Image (cartoon, rainbow, N blue to C red):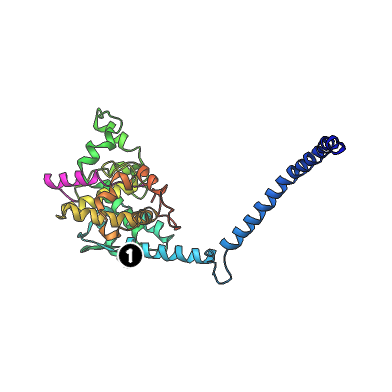
Amino acid sequence: MENENQSPVQNNHDAPVENKRQTENKKFLPISILLSAFVVAAAWIYTSGPKATEVVQPVDTVAEQDANSAKELEELEENVLPLDGVTIPIKWGNLGTQMIDAGVIDKEKFEEIYSKRGGFAEDQKKLLYGADNGEIKMTEANSGFLLNLFWAFGLANKNEILEKGPMVNYDGKEPASPAEAMEKAGRFASTGGWSLATSDAMNYYSKYPFVALTPEQQGVVERVSKNIYRPCCGNSTYFPDCNHGMAMLGLVELMAAQGMNEDEMYKIALRVNSYWFPDTYLTIAKYLKGTAWENADPKEILGSDFSSGSGFQKIREKVTPPEREEGGGCGV
């Protein structure tokens, strides 16, 4: 009987002890979980990390990156700006002396500005003063000289684009008189900026028929000029409001007058524009990636999507331009 009476008492006494142990176990449970997680993480790092036999590839050094960039630029330049230049298949004849005689080029002013740039090379003297010039070779070295020469020609050669096109009706209003047309046309960099004439540039504006075009040739000039843009602005050659536009118009007139077909004209125009805007066309060539420069469509590249100011800006946002000094601005 004694044992039976004591049994419940003993069981009641042991219950708190068991609860205490459970409480202590619960306290240690989070610590155990943390320790287990640490062990698992350490094991994973050990097994997934580089082994002693593995070689970790180093990141390219700055010098290696610079070397790769220089090599890329060299390859682009070989295609876009060949050192041996581009041959412009037109006969220049004595147009240099004709422009000097007309006054659109002042011989003394021209010589003075180039004396500060190292003087004329022999081929430049011949184009300016010679009488029997054949094809013209353009290189990076003489591209600025030819820009000025074509600028003077485009300004002075008589053409309907200058007399009836955007140069005089850019605001949507036709001039009320020839005097108003001249006043409107004289507001641009291509006219007011030509400072190498004997007198005011507008005295020579579309005045001399150095090269007379047939109606068919004039049509070619108008079609082609409307599709050749330049990245210094958003206008085509049909609106030659800067020196590059006026120079390109002159070149297009010369090519059309000598019977060149439109495809060939675009090829030459792209080569010429590339020398005038080297940074632009090196960037475009880089953007084309897998397409070889010689296989690119010149007409498409010269169009608004690539060669206008806004078009090129979109290209520029998609590719890092090669680091290179840009060509000249819109002055002599």
Is 305 included in the stretch rendered in magenta?
A: no
- Horizontal and vertical percent position of residue 146: 31, 57
Name the residue rendered at 14%, 55% in the picture. 259
Residue 2 is left or right of residue 307, and the answer is right
Q: Quadrant location of residue 175? A: top left
- Horizontal and vertical percent position of residue 85: 30, 64
Reading the image, the residue beneath label 1 is 82
Residue 88 is left or right of residue 281, and the answer is left
Secondary element type, mark 1:
loop
- Horizontal and vertical percent position of residue 304: 30, 44
Q: Is residue 178 above or below residue 271?
A: above
The residues colored magenta run 211-231
Name the residue rendered at 54%, 69% in the picture. 55
Q: Is residue 68 above or below residue 273?
A: below
Quadrant of the drawing holding the N terminus: top right
Front-lying residue, 145 or 295:
295
Name the residue rendered at 28%, 53% in the picture. 150
For mark 1, does the 10 Å Cα neighbourhood hold few (<14), some (14 to 19), or many (20 or more) residues? Answer: some
The amino acid type, in three-letter code, at marker 1 is Pro
Q: Is residue 231 above or below residue 95?
A: above
Q: Quadrant location of residue 52? A: bottom right
Front-lying residue, 8 or 276:
8
Q: Is residue 228 visible?
A: yes
